[in-house]
Image: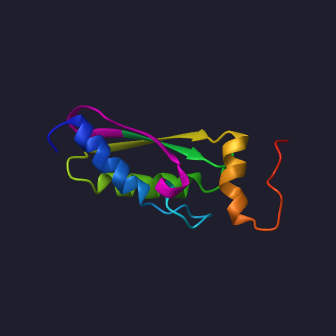
Amino acid sequence: MNNRSELSEAVRAAVSEVTDPELDQRFGDLGMVRDVRAGRRGQVTVQIALTTPGCPLTDQIRADVSAAAAGVAGVSAVTVEFSVMPQAERSALLAPARPGRPPARAG
């Protein structure tokens, strides 16, 4: 890659193809890839928004995202950070996965 911007874009594309292990849809389609930053010497940081706090699949998601990012030419190290989707976004995302059921309410 010629610069950090190109590396960030390539990593975002790779990570967007990773499938959420619970929802069985790609992170890019779900809007879960929040940020990708490329630093010096190929170090990248990827921020993923989880649908629930304390997600039991965090370790698997970290491993899958790390593997996808590390597969991009020019990446030397990967850090995965997590945030949690706001309730309104989570409800909108999960509503199609639960046909016939009302969206979950914030508790």
- For this rendering, which residue is in front, 93 or 72? 93
Q: Residue at x 49, y 61 (%)?
A: 26
- For this rendering, which residue is in front, 17 or 62? 17
Q: In this view of the protein, can residue 76 be seen by the observer?
A: yes
Rendered location of residue 7, percent (x, y): 25, 43
Question: Is the N terminus in the top left, top right, bottom left or bottom right quadrant?
Answer: top left
Q: For residue 98, which quarter of the picture?
A: bottom right
Specify whether 29 is left or right of 8: right
> Vertical placement of 27 versus 46: above or below?
below
Numbered circles on residues, count: 0
Q: In this view of the protein, can residue 53 be seen by the observer?
A: no
Rendered location of residue 54, percent (x, y): 68, 46
Q: Residue at x 61, y 64 (%)?
A: 23
Specify whether 104 is left or right of 48: right
Task: Give the image's coloring scheme.
Answer: rainbow
- The residue most toward the top is 40
Q: Residue at x 65, y 49 (%)?
A: 51
Taking the magenta stretch, the answer to whether it contains residue 31 is yes
Q: Residue at x 54, y 41 (%)?
A: 82
Rendered location of residue 63, percent (x, y): 46, 56
> Vertical placement of 107 versus 93: above or below?
above
Question: Is the C terminus in the top left, top right, bottom left or bottom right quadrant?
Answer: top right
Taking the magenta stretch, the answer to whether it contains residue 43 is yes
Specify whether 74 is left or right of 93: left
Rendered location of residue 74, percent (x, y): 20, 47
Please provide the residue range marked out in magenta.
28-44
- For this rendering, which residue is in front, 68 or 3? 3
Q: For residue 103, which quarter of the picture?
A: bottom right
